[in-house]
Amino acid sequence: MYNKNFITLLLLFLVILDLALSTICLYSPELWFKIMHGTGYADSLGIIRRLGAVWFAFLVFQSAALFLWKKQAWWLVLVAGIRFTEIFSDWVYWYFAENLTWFGYFGLLISPPANLFFGIILIKSYLQFHNEKPL
């Protein structure tokens, strides 16, 4: 089904994705508003920085998984669970957000099915590799 190089590349992709997302949200929230909403920075409650902290947590766990999953395949299930936490949130954001740019519109629509897909791949991979080598 999936080979180890493919799973390593998928985890690397997720690490890079969440590195970019968390960095933008934590250190340049005004850039987030420009890219996603085409508006000036308006986040008096710090919700975007909170989102950046959540993605930073994703980054930490996915980075650990990237280095540890070949010896401890359960990391794949943990990362799948993390990805599944984002299945509904972006569609809720898309529904209620005002002034979405084309990038924001597309990104928020595509990310829930992408996260579902990534999670399923990771769980199937865990089952495949778990059967090859007991934990």
Image (spheres, rainbow, N blue to C red):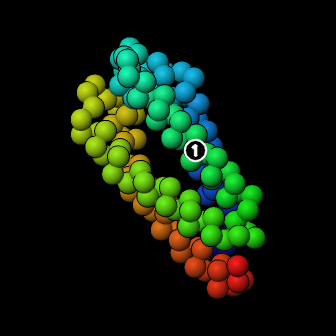
- Residue 17 in view, yes or no: no
Residue at the location (37% across, 17% down)? 44
- What amino acid type is highlighted by mark number 1? Ala
Q: Quadrant of residue 126?
A: bottom right
| Quarter assignment of residue 128 | bottom right
Residue 29 vertical placement versus 75 (above, below): above
| x 37%, y 34%: residue | 104
Q: How many marks?
A: 1
- Give the image location of residue 105, x and y in percent: 33, 37
Reading the image, the residue beneath label 1 is 57
Q: Secondary structure at mark 1?
A: helix
User: Which percent across, then down, holds residue 82?
Assistant: 50, 55
The quadrant of the image that shows the C terminus is bottom right
Q: Where is 72 relative to 54, above or below? A: below
Q: Give the x, y percent position of residue 119.
A: 49, 63
Q: Tell me the quarter of the image containing the N terminus.
A: bottom right
Pick whichever, 114 or 57, lies toward us.
Answer: 57
The answer to which image quadrant residue 106 occupies is top left
Q: Give the class, few, some or many, for how many residues have Cα within 10 Å of label 1's Cα (few <14, many ≥20).
A: some
Asked whether residue 110 is in view, the answer is yes
> Where does the image place residue 110, in percent across and percent down from the top left?
38, 49
Q: Residue drawn at (41%, 29%), measured in percent from left and top?
A: 47
Residue plotted at (57% across, 44% down): 57
